[in-house]
Amino acid sequence: MSYPLVCLGNPLLDLQVDVEPEYLAKYDLKADDAILAEEKHLPIYKEVIEKPGLKLVAGGAAQNTARGAQYILPENSVVYFGSVGKDVYAEKLNEANKQYGLRTEYQVVDDVATGKCAALINHPHRSLVTDLAAANLFKAEHLEKPENWILVENAKCFYIGGFHLTVSPEAIEKLGKHAAENNKLFALNFSAPFIAQFFKDPLDASLPYVDYVVSNESEAAAYAESHNLDVDQKDVVAIAKEIAKLPKANSKRNRTVVFTQGTEPTVVVTYNQSTQDFDVQEFKVRELASEKVVDTNGAGDAFAAGFIAGLVQEKSLADAIDIGQWAASLSIQEVGPTFPFPKQTYSA
Ligand code: 26A
């Protein structure tokens, strides 16, 4: 079988619940952030289980994007790799992926629980606290198994959750090298500010392989800060230019950096290696009445899903952005990082 898109990330089950600002304050959490749980955060998982209105939804940023891309693309288009345990949480993930027709090739580990993310909603914000557990145990060797590597060889596009830089930079490098050597498309999401802050070295090591960066404004600012860029941290165009012109392993493709900014326009910067010029574009987001917004958990993943699905279908950059914005507007009208069924189809 050949699937055009291969995704890699940390499979998580989201424990989604509404909380008051006091609850976030109690655990030193920002209203809008995504972090790895420290010891002090662990009681959260027990507490949210008790909270009224708790929802269990399939999560994991790149898995959300993989499901979303499969939602948009023809059947059998997307394969997702990551690591889970043998438990009911993994069963929940399998159920959701099946509904979308997403093929998963999980590395299944014994005696460790499937990863979970407390998605603490204080509308319109969301604070994500993740216990990676089994998701932390993914190994590059899993990709190298002949039955998996054939899927890699048959793919034409790769999408990597930057969150996976905390788990297996080796696996990311393997896919990046393969993509560069075979002139295949390679996309990376910066995922969260802490990646640029605390996983700077593996991030920098992966960037030469990256043709498309998909990210948001707070991750752009974190990148600018950790790399001491001589730019205003709010100037996403200037930050995008710095990233777009970094060295590339595959000189046959230019690098494009896409920064979403919530309801503000999406900024897209491409560096043309031969002319050494930048192409800078801005795209307005789709308007949506605020009462239609259910929650923004997974909005960025949904954008990435539409965008990468557009690239897989070889649409123009502008069309791929528009499919991304359409997908994001669908997802924020649902609970958690999900899409509506019966399936909706894109129209410009
Ligand atoms: C390593 N970390 C912190 C994470 C995540 C994550 N996915 C992978 N790794 N922290 C939060 N998420 C997921 O992000 C989605 C929203 O964009 C959550 O599971 C949520 O579904």
Image (tube, helix red, strand yellow):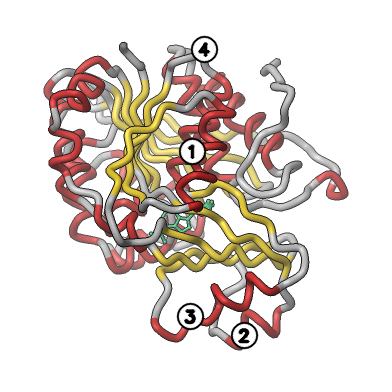
Numbered disc 3: secondary structure:
helix
Mark 4 or mark 1, which has the lower sequence index? Answer: 4
Picture layout, residue 314 above or below residue 138: above
**Label 3 Cα crowd, 10 Å radius (few <14 / some 14-19 / many 20+):** some
Q: Residues within 10 Å of mark 2 (few under 14, many from 20)?
A: few
Q: Specify the amino acid type for callout 4.
A: Pro
Front position among marks 1 and 2 = 1
Residue topped by disc 3: 41
Residue 334, how many percent across, how many down? 73, 43
Quarter of the rendering occupied by the N terminus: top left
> Sequence-wise, which precedes: disc 4 or disc 3?
3
**Which quadrant holds residue 134?**
bottom left
Q: Is tag 4's residue or tag 2's residue first in the polypeptide sequence? A: 2
Q: CA distance from mark 2 to mark 3?
A: 12 Å
Query: Which residue bears the numbered disc 4?
Result: 74
Residue at horizontal 76 percent and vertical 63 percent from the top: 53
Give the Cα distance between marks 4 and 2. 44 Å
Specify whether tag 3 is near ligand 1 (CB below 8 Å). no
Query: Mark 3 and mark 4 in contact (Cβ < 8 Å)?
Result: no
Is 13 rendered above or below residue 273?
A: below
Secondary structure beneath disc 4? loop
The residue identified by callout 2 is 25
Determine which of the numbered discs, if any, sits on residue 94 in the image. 1
- Of the pair 215 and 233, the residue shown nearer to us: 215
Between tags 4 and 2, which lies in front? Answer: 4
